[in-house]
Image (spheres, rainbow, N blue to C red):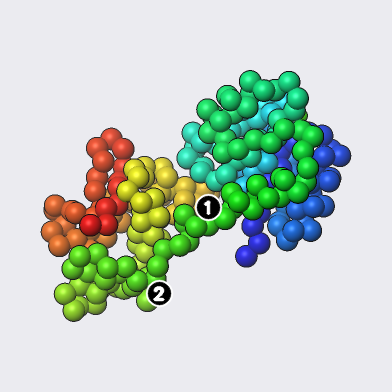
Amino acid sequence: MNEKILIIEDEEDLVKGLKINLLDEGYKVDYSLDGKEGLSKALSEKPDLILLDIMLPGMNGLEICKELRRKNMDIPILMLTAKGEEIDKVIGLEMGADDYISKPFSIRELLARIKAHLRREKRDQKDIPEKIELGHVVLDFSHLKIIKKNKEVYLTFMEAEILKYLISKKGKIVTRNNLLDNVWGYERFPTTRTIDNHILKLRKKIEEDPNHPKHILTVYGGGYRFIRD
Ligand code: CA
């Protein structure tokens, strides 16, 4: 599947050049010349990576970045900074940008960085083995089932997606909002109770004692955390 890159940048010539090069590399590309519109595109179109200018009409790149992170959108954001925006780079990273590149930049360098970020993202999210042993149970994602004490228990698609997402975070805290945004997607809005119900069902399926879970832990006030052993 082709990854989608959203460019939020108001210099039309730069956008044109970027678009040609990115399309050439096989990416899907969308762009916005305005900050506010860019933000709403980022939220509705779920790009895989965002190239984000700082000085923009409507809303500046730093605010956009902050807003996206506040909404738990955790895709890579690469800031495009102009000369004289040295301080903004630091603030940008504080606001949650993953990287920045100073204008004028070479397109080759930009493409290399985009590739690196997307690769890392993929490795984190998709490199979950098809079968995982968890103490007394075996998770079999390719068949959506769990083998528990020689009995087979089936997982729903959503349960498998939640488990994979939790596992991909390797013990880090996953908030309910992270799950809403990354498993359900930005345009569907189940309640946090829906998530808790899914977690309860998952615990019944994979935990030896669902009342004292060892793998899917609740972090009070935070969310959930997956522990493998
Ligand atoms: Ca600009």
Left or right, residue 213 beside residue 162? left
Give the image location of residue 55, x and y in percent. Answer: 72, 26
Residue type at the position of mark 2? Ser
Left or right, residue 149 beside residue 7:
left
* Residue 142: numbered disc: 2
Crowding near the residue tagged with mark 2, few <14, some 14–19, many ≥20 C-alpha atoms within 10 Å? few
Residue in the picture at 84% in, 45% down: 16
Query: What SS does tag 1 mark?
Result: helix
- Please give the name of the residue rendered at 70% of the width and 23% of the height, measured from the top-left corner: 85
Q: CA distance from mark 1 to mark 2?
A: 21 Å
User: Which residue type carries mark 1?
Assistant: Glu
Per the image, the residue denoted by label 1 is 121
Q: Secondary structure at mark 2?
A: helix
Which mark identifies residue 169? Answer: none
The quadrant of the image that shows the C terminus is: bottom left
Percent x, y of residue 37: 69, 37
Residue at 75% x, 53% y is 22
